[in-house]
Amino acid sequence: MRGSSEVQLVSASRVSFGQRVAIMNAAYADYYVPMRVTPEQIAQMDRCHDVDVSRSVVARARWESVGMGMLALRGQRAWISGVGVMPAWRRRGVAQAMMRYLIEKAREAGVDRVSLEVIDQNQPAQNLYIDLGFCIQRELLTWRRSATAEPLPIPLERLTPVAPEVLLGYADGWRDQAPCWQRETGTLRKMADQLKGYRLDWRDEPTAYCVLNDREDTVTLVDIGLNPDAGLLMPGRLLLQALAALYADRPVSIINVPADDSLNRILAALGFLVTVRQLEMVLDLTPT
């Protein structure tokens, strides 16, 4: 263990799923976007995001856990997520200590770069990350279209159900921008058995696809691909119009679309609204 005499930092592998759930739910209950997770969701995030629990961290003060941060690894890259501190322990250096711990663990793992996302309103966290050497890489947008939004024209083209694993074979060549960690192909392949996929054919050719999480109360798009040989705007518009018709009774959202992605023009034109803005930040660990 390491840390001050008041707060000790330990590997997250030393606490149970239940404890990690409790820490995250308590730390994020009053966050800009409140979040609640279950043990099953924590287990899925560990698996799909390639979280290394042994290199992740929990901050403890005497008999209670007061903070947590997760470190995920893919080859020469690392990703930090879920850094949260209990309200009573904020502004006491706990988050900074945990971040330094995670960065050290990333160095030990031999990675070249560490990335993370932070809500744009969270200026204290941004300042902390900048002080630690992170630089802003790009802005990421979360869009949502309400179930009560004006109905969209229903295109003649229909969506064909296709296994997500098959659709992800198009992914690398059909994305306008590189996705963030949560939407990378490596993440989505591990989630494929819980997702649905649809392909849109235009002019008798596969032209666009979407992969989504279909829940009772909402539909969350986790990936959209548009065939660049067919252009982006028309296939993208037809895909989303057909999707809106298929799920007319539910809101549709998509997380973390890079701000420079051409998809944003289509989303805005079809009545999607930006609900969350995040900044993707990167720390270069390449030896100088």
Image (spheres, grey):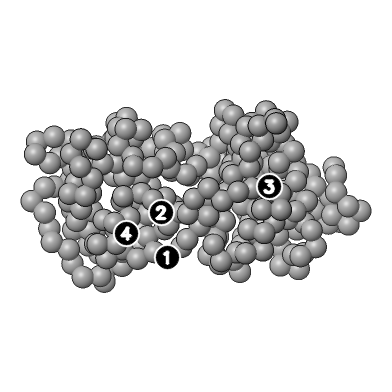
Task: Please rate how many residues cluster around mark 1, counting C-alpha atoms within 10 Å: few if below 14, some from 14 to 19, many from 20.
Answer: few
- Would you name the residue on which mark 3 appears? 133
* Mark 3: amino acid: Gly
Between marks 3 and 1 in the image, the one whose residue lies nearer the viewer: 3
Q: Report, in whole angstroms, how far the alpha carbon at label 3 lies from the one at label 1.
A: 28 Å
Q: Is disc 4 placed on a helix, strand or loop?
A: strand
Q: Do the residues under discs 4 and 2 have CB atoms within 8 angstroms? A: no
Q: Earlier in the sequence, mark 2 or mark 1?
A: 2
Q: Report, in whole angstroms, how far the alpha carbon at label 4 lies from the one at label 1.
A: 12 Å
Task: Tell me what residue is drawn at x 66 percent, y 32 percent.
Answer: 286
As drawn, is 158 to the left or to the right of 259? Answer: left
Q: Report, in whole angstroms, how far the alpha carbon at label 2 lies from the one at label 1.
A: 13 Å
Residue 258 can be seen in this image: yes
| x then y, percent, for residue 146 | 31, 67
Q: Report, in whole angstroms, how far the alpha carbon at label 4 lies from the one at label 3.
A: 36 Å
Give whichever of 44, 81 is nearer the camera: 81
Residue at the limit of the structure toward the front, as seen here: 288
Task: Please rate how many residues cluster around mark 3, counting C-alpha atoms within 10 Å: few if below 14, some from 14 to 19, many from 20.
Answer: few
Q: Report, in whole angstroms, how far the alpha carbon at label 4 lies from the one at label 2.
A: 19 Å
Above or below 63: residue 164: above
Task: Tell me what residue is drawn at x 88 percent, y 57 percent.
Answer: 6
Q: Earlier in the sequence, mark 3 or mark 2?
A: 3
Q: Is disc 3 placed on a helix, strand or loop?
A: loop
